[in-house]
Image (cartoon, rainbow, N blue to C red):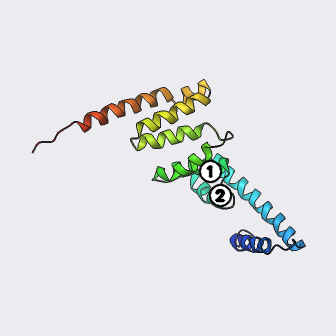
Amino acid sequence: FLEKNNEANLEVVQLSHKKGGKKTKADHAFDEAFQSFEKKKQADADNAFNLGDYPAGLKLFSELLTNSPEDPENNFKFGVCIFNAEKDKNKAIPYFQAASKSLKTPSEVFYYLAMIHHLNNQYDLAIGNFEKFAKISSSSEIKKMKIDRKIENCINGKIVFASLASVEIIH
């Protein structure tokens, strides 16, 4: 029942709070049921994420962020789902940026931001985010993710783009 009527039920609770009235037993019962539903949805979303089922994660994290848009962990996981399931990786940027403001967010948030900037040929932004990732990650993680090589690729990309800018086409 709650899953199908989640938005309608949320509106009812919001309306009862806006009226300034005291919560009834029904309000408390609904709050408990809604919290239980949200915990299950969080568990389902986390499970989809952990299994690499990014399309399922997209739907679930999107719903969770509707009720709690500032949650850094869900912003990060939603960004990862977008990065892996969507063609347009840029859609993930606002979620990674929101997540990056929290100390609780995994260092990989900077890795993903760097990768998106690299794909967009924004090499300075990519290098900056790769360096942030390296600064707060373990040496084994840096080695595993080949951060030094990715920074080299960005530097080479800058050189290639600079040389392309000076090419003159003559008819």
Label 1: how many residues lie within 10 Å, few (<14), some (14-19) or many (20+)? many
Is residue 144 toward the left or the right of residue 104 in the image? left
Mark 1 and mark 2: Cα distance apart in space: 7 Å
Q: What element carries label 2?
A: helix
In this figure, which residue is indicated by the disc labeled 2?
65
Residue 109 shows up from this direction: yes
In the rendered view of the protein, which quadrant contains the N terminus?
bottom right
Q: Would you place residue 76 above or below residue 44 in this image? A: above
Residue receiving disc 1: 75
Q: How crowded is mark 2: few (under 14 residues within 10 Å), some or many (20 or more)?
A: some
Q: Is residue 26 rendered to the left or right of residue 109?
A: right
Q: Which residue is drawn at 48% across and 26% down?
A: 148
How far from the left and from the top, in percent, is residue 132?
55, 33
In the picture shown, does residue 14 fall above or below 100?
Answer: below
Looking at the rendered image, the quarter that the C terminus falls into is top left
- Front-lying residue, 3 or 12: 12
Disc 2 marks a residue whose amino acid type is Leu
Q: In this view, does 75 lie above or below 103?
A: below
Mark 1 vs 2: CB contact within 8 A: yes
Instruction: Give the residue type at disc 1.
Output: Asn
Q: Which mark is residue 136?
A: none
Query: Which residue extends farthest top?
Result: 139
